[in-house]
Image: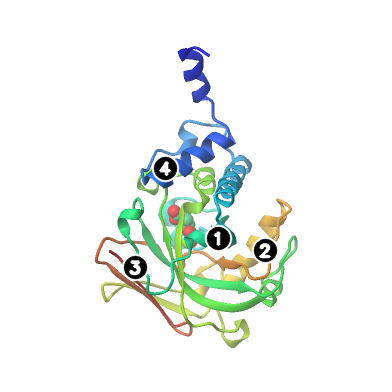
Amino acid sequence: MNAQQERQRSDVWDVARAAAVLLDAEAARVDRGPITAEWAGLDLDTAYRVQDEILCRKVESGQHIVGVKLGLTSRAKQQRMGVDSPSTAWLTDRMVLPVGAPLVIEQLIHPRVEPEIVFVLGERLAGPGITAARAMEAVSHVYGGLEIIDSRYTDFKFTLPDVVADNASSALFVIGGVARKPDEMDLALEACLLAVDGEVVDSATGAAVQGHPGEALALAANALAKRQLALEPGWVVLTGGMTDAVFVEPGSHVSADFSNLGSVTLRCQ
Ligand code: OOG
Ligand code: MG
């Protein structure tokens, strides 16, 4: 192959190349422009294939799938990101940040932190046709959590296919130490105060997430069913940021204080 053929070849986008580009950006901690600006063919179905390809490569490198996250399930998130459709993405064990462990900012590109209601599933949940009520029956425990997102795109600027391909900006997540049974509380009314350095910067209730976080869980089960996939027992489900995400820097201290799910805190260094 001569130099020109080689250059032309590297101009051709496909699922494997998009996955490699996003994995490289994550590993190198370097952001880039949206892929749709270079590859008009990146539609939503193709974007999920990129997301799945990234998951495959992570599993090949020794990571294990631990669950699913929902993206853009609240109006606060949809308005900020300019994308109004919820989506799903994968969680692996490498993304787990234990309670009390610091968030090392330099290990990421430009992290933001958002509070989420988190489910752990006691049974398999397979769509289609899953309602929120049915979805909640599959939940064994509910937790408060913090998700640390880190888009591989400059300034978090992306279209829906871009963010889906980028595994919904996933980076890390913390699950709080207070576990509740789902029938012990009304999750639509579960309140969360988000504070940075002791100052409350935002607040929401669970109703911000699709009216009830159980709706987000049902949405995930039904969306996965379209790809012949299901939510498996023991999986973690992040139901989506309740508020807008906050930027953090070394020294920041974030806390999400939930009414029944305890406080989840994160120190940045
Ligand atoms: C996309 C990820 C969205 C959520 O909870 O809505 C997400 C982004 O905001 O970069 O994790
Ligand atoms: Mg999130």
| Residue 267, horizontal then vertical, whole percent | 31, 70
Q: Label 4 belongs to which residue?
A: 25
Comes first in the chain, label 1 or label 3: 1
- Mark 3 burial class by Cα count in 10 Å: few <14, some 14-19, many 20+: some
Instruction: Give x and y (percent) for residue 191.
Output: 45, 79
Q: Nearer the viewer, mark 1 or mark 3?
A: 3
Mark 3: which amino acid?
Pro
Can you tell which mark lies on residue 53? none
Local secondary structure at mark 1: strand
Mark 4 within 8 Å of ligand 1, using the beta carbon? no
Q: Are marks 2 and 4 in contact (CB under 8 Å)?
A: no
Identify the residue at the far front of this view.
62
- Residue toward you, 50 or 215: 50
**Disc 4 marks which amino acid?**
Ala
Amino acid type at circle 2 is: Leu
Q: Residue at x 50, y 69 (%)?
A: 208
Instruction: Please give the label number shown on residue 102.
Output: 3
Inter-mark Cα distance, 2 to 1: 12 Å
Where residue 96 sits in the image (x, y, percent)? 48, 65
Name the mark nearer the viewer: 1 or 4.
Answer: 4
Amino acid at circle 1:
Leu
Helix, strand or loop at label 4? It is helix
Judging by the rendered image, the residue that carries numbered circle 2 is 231
Left/right placement of residue 98 relative to residue 246 reads: right
Q: Looking at the image, is mark 3 or mark 2 nearer the viewer? A: 3
| Residue at numbered disc 1 | 70
Question: Which of the two labelled residues, at mark 3 and mark 2, occupies the earlier sequence position?
Answer: 3
Q: Using the rendered view, name the quadrant where residue 180 is placed.
A: bottom right
Label 3: state its secondary structure: loop
Residue 100 in percent (x, y) is at 37, 74
Observer able to see residue 212 = no
Q: Earlier in the sequence, mark 2 or mark 1?
A: 1
